Amino acid sequence: MNIIPLSIPTPFYVGDVNVYLIKEDPLTLIDVGPKTKEAANALRDKLGRNGVQIADIRRIVLTHAHEDHCGLAKQVRDEAKDAEIFVHEWETGNLFGRLGEERHRKLLLRLGVPDKIFREMQSLYGEISLLTDALEDGDFRPLSDDMELGFESGSLRVLHTPGHTPGSCSFVREANRTLICGDCVLKRITPNPILSPDPVKPDERFKSLAEYLVSLAKLRSFSPTLAYGGHGEPVTDFDEIFNRYVRSIDERQKRVVSLVTNNGITAYDLAQILFRDSFNNDVHRFLAISEAAAHLDYAEMEGKIALELNDGIEYYRKL
């Protein structure tokens, strides 16, 4: 299978995003990049170098619905005319707007986030959302676990790998154990377990870290020889990355548990301690709160700390 990585610029601190051209019938893009002129020009240029025009694309497959990955989906779809967009139906990131609904506000206030701070984060993400065109129900076809995406030389198997987002998906070429895994596995950074409403129980928080660890183990079970991530270089030693991730998560768990007091701590307060130097920098505040909440959820699920609700705010206490 002819998988061609295309590095596309983004305005985010994470740097370029990897878009993957599957140069087989039907011509397919896995992710597309953000909706910026620079990204659109880069995508057009790099496709051209591989003898492909945007009008030739028949299928757009999204690993997840964050702006750097999905922003150009509608634009590419419209220019290609017959192209279909595929994304998991649990992908609540930018399918319908991020931090744009009342349930997002309620989830964050429950974590101890002051309403003023939530409004600031909501405003920031309102600006970031301009880097994508939100998808409506009729704009995409759903991906599902074990679904096959067929090509002339074989197929890619869809793997639902929630964690970074609820609907994150990876894809495996089982013939040679090659993965395309979006932001589920990145060579140089650990993916953030983004705070999201639970797709099944939307008034509750999605248990992102617990789900992520299951997804990592799921990917490892294929004994991958090569893993293409959403950013940076491909991974050629999956076990090394797996073990590094698990060690990093375990170390942070220990740190989180050590910071929980008898008087209780909120995810908002914990985030300011864990990420003191970057907490007030742009999107880092929301990412920090997401990370803190994910680790507190996981520690509570593992029976390491206790959770109490007081005046609508969650406090985590020592057992």
Image (cartoon, grey):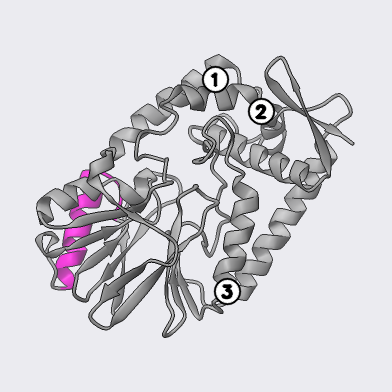
Figure check: 195 above or below 209: above
- In three-dimensional space, the C-alpha distance between marks 1 and 2, rounded to whole angstroms, equals 10 Å
Which residue matches tag 1? 117
Q: Quadrant of the C terminus?
A: top right
Q: Quadrant of the N terminus?
A: bottom left
- In three-dimensional space, the C-alpha distance between marks 1 and 3, rounded to whole angstroms, equals 39 Å
Within 10 Å of disc 1 (Cα), the crowding (few <14, some 14-19, many 20+) is some
Residue 286, disc = none
Earlier residue among tags 1 and 2: 1
Cβ–Cβ under 8 Å for marks 1 and 2: yes
Identify the secondary structure beneath mark 2. Answer: helix
Which residue matches tag 2? 268
Earlier residue among tags 2 and 3: 3
Q: Quadrant of residue 125?
A: top left
What span is colored magenta in the figure?
A: 32-50
Identify the secondary structure beneath mark 1. Answer: helix
Q: Is residue 61 visible?
A: yes
Figure check: 17 above or below 107: below
Which residue matches tag 3? 238
Q: Is residue 232 visible?
A: no
Q: Amino acid at mark 2?
A: Tyr
**Whole-percent x and y of residue 214?**
62, 60
In the rendered view, does 226 fall on the left or right side of 273?
left
